[in-house]
Image: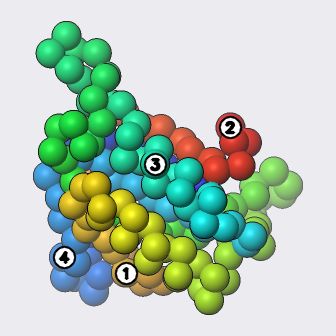
């Protein structure tokens, strides 16, 4: 399971020209679910997302989590994070989980993160337009298999 986390001062996601999720200060999390991912992968990613310290404290040191600042998370499913672009010019998405495996894990991620912070989300498999102000910019990559 992979995630791209971006610190934001505001973000939204639209489907068919309708806003389906919107947050102010917090994190935008793009989540890629791979074939073979388990609840252990989900737990690792969710714990990291909720606890990662990327917000400044009073000394301007990134020492606070989204929980600490009473922020929100905009969670977006993004199978393209599972792409393998090492060969050729066209990325392969063969490692991305099929919807029948990915949807339950995505829904479980929403539920798990919602236990700690408010969550808004996109629509699984929809063509989405995501708008965000990347504050910093501050972007972190996560991989539950710890490949990077």
Q: In this picture, is 120 found above or below 144?
A: below
Sequence order check, earlier mark of 3 and 4: 4
What is the number of the mark on residue 47?
3
Q: Position of residue 55 (x, y in %)?
A: 27, 30
In the displayed orientation, state which residue is furthest to the top. Answer: 59
Foreground mark, 3 or 1, reads: 3
> Label 1, label 2: how many angstroms apart (C-alpha)?
28 Å
- Find disc 1 in the rendering and name its residue: 123
Q: Residues within 10 Å of mark 4 (few under 14, many from 20)?
A: some
Q: Residues within 10 Å of mark 1 (few under 14, many from 20)?
A: some
Sequence order check, earlier mark of 1 and 2: 1
Whether residues under marks 3 and 1 lie with C-beta atoms below 8 angstroms apart, the answer is no
Q: In this picture, is 23 found above or below 58?
A: below
Secondary element under disc 1, as helix, strand or loop, is loop
> Label 3, label 1: how many angstroms apart (C-alpha)?
22 Å
Whether residues under marks 3 and 2 lie with C-beta atoms below 8 angstroms apart, the answer is no
Secondary element under disc 4, as helix, strand or loop, is strand
Kindly tell me whether residue 80 is visible in this rendering. no
Instruction: Name the residue at 27% across, 86% down.
Output: 16
In terms of depth relative to the viewer, which is nearer, 64 or 60?
A: 64
Foreground mark, 2 or 4, reads: 2
- Find disc 2 in the rendering and name its residue: 148
Sequence order check, earlier mark of 1 and 4: 4
- Find disc 4 in the rendering and name its residue: 19
In terms of depth relative to the viewer, which is nearer, 90 or 118?
A: 118
Kindly tell me whether residue 22 is visible in this rendering. yes
Q: Which quadrant is home to the N terminus?
A: bottom right
Answer with the quarter of the image where residue 13 lies. bottom left
Sequence order check, earlier mark of 3 and 2: 3
């Amino acid at each position: 399971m992979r995630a791209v986390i971006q610190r934001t001062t505001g973000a939204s996601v639209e489907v068919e020209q309708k806003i389906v999720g919107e947050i102010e200060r917090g994190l935008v999390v793009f989540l890629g679910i791979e074939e073979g991912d388990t609840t252990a992968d989900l737990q690792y990613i969710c714990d990291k997302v909720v606890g990662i310290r990327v917000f400044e404290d009073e000394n301007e040191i990134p020492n606070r989590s989204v929980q600490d600042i009473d922020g929100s998370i905009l969670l977006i499913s993004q199978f393209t994070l599972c792409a393998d672009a090492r060969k050729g010019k066209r990325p392969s998405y063969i490692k991305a989980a099929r919807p029948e495996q990915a949807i339950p894990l995505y829904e479980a991620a929403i539920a798990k993160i919602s236990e700690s912070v408010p969550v808004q989300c996109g629509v699984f498999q929809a063509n989405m337009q995501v708008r965000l102000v990347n504050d910093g910019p501050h972007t972190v990559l996560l991989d539950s298999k710890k490949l990077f």
